[in-house]
């Protein structure tokens, strides 16, 4: 057995190395992370970003455009006005209507007592 995590496992972890919520399928991104290229904002076509955030990113992040929807996810791009670091932020998951209906049906019947007549 090899040591270390595979690529898929590493992508499903946050910066602290803990598992994180990730969409079932990956959402295509317009961000290219590079240390060789200068940061650039060609939103909505493309964003070139440094690999890592800097202290300025905590106060200088700006939202780019309006929230977008892909699949069951609503997301928005944010970019630091100072250093150019960019991220795609998942804002929320759109509920699965069929799953919610099934859960409601199960819950409605779960607490019903069958009293003999």
Image (tube, helix red, strand yellow):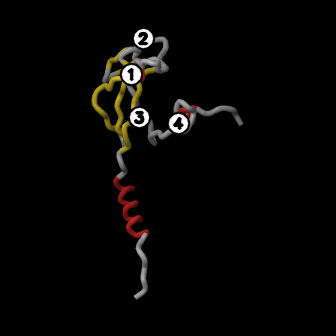
User: How far apart are the alpha carbons under marks 2 and 3?
Assistant: 24 Å
Marks 2 & 1, CB-CB < 8 Å contact: no
Question: Mark 4: which secondary structure?
Answer: loop
Residue density around tag 1, few if under 14, some if 14–19, many if 20 or more, within 10 Å: few
Q: CA distance from mark 2 to mark 4?
A: 27 Å
Reading the image, the residue beneath label 2 is: 38
Q: Image point 49% across, 19% down: which residue?
A: 51
> Which mark is first along the chain, 3 or 1?
3
Mark closer to the observer (2, 1): 1
Q: Is residue 10 left or right of residue 33?
A: right
Residue on which disc 4 sits: 12
**Residue marked by disc 3:** 27
Crowding near pointer 4: few (<14 within 10 Å), some, many (20+)? some
Local packing at callout 3 (Cα closer than 10 Å; few below 14, some 14-19, many 20+) is: some
In the rendered image, residue 67, in percent from the top left (x then y), is placed at 30, 33
Mark 3 and mark 4: Cα distance apart in space: 13 Å
Quick one: label 2 or label 3, which is nearer the N terminus?
A: 3
Residue 59 shows which numbered tag?
1
| Crowding at mark 2 (Cα within 10 Å: few <14, some 14-19, many 20+) | few
> In whole angstroms, how far apart are the C-alphas of marks 2 and 1?
21 Å
| Point 38% across, 14% down: residue | 82
Q: Quadrant of the N terminus?
A: top right
Q: Earlier in the sequence, mark 2 or mark 4?
A: 4
Looking at the rendering, which quadrant does residue 89 occupy? top left
Question: What is the CA distance from the residue labelled 1 to the residue labelled 3?
Answer: 26 Å
Q: Nearer the viewer, mark 1 or mark 3?
A: 1
Q: Measured from the top left, where is residue 31 in percent x and y? A: 41, 23
Picture quarter containing residue 65? top left
Residue 23 horizontal/vertical position (percent): 44, 40
Q: Residue furthest left?
A: 66
Query: Percent position (x, y) of residue 53?
Result: 47, 21
């Amino acid at each position: 057995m090899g040591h270390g995590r595979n690529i898929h496992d590493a992508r499903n972890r946050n910066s602290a190395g803990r598992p994180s919520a990730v969409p079932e399928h990956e959402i295509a991104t317009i961000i290219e992370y590079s240390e060789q290229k200068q940061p650039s904002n060609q939103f909505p076509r493309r964003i070139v970003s440094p690999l890592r955030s800097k202290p300025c990113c905590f106060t200088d992040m700006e939202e780019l455009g309006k929230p977008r929807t892909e699949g069951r996810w609503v997301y928005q791009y944010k970019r630091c006005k100072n250093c150019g670091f960019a991220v795609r932020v998942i804002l929320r998951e759109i509920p699965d209507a069929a799953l919610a209906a099934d859960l409601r049906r199960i819950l409605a019947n779960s607490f019903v007592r069958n009293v003999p007549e």
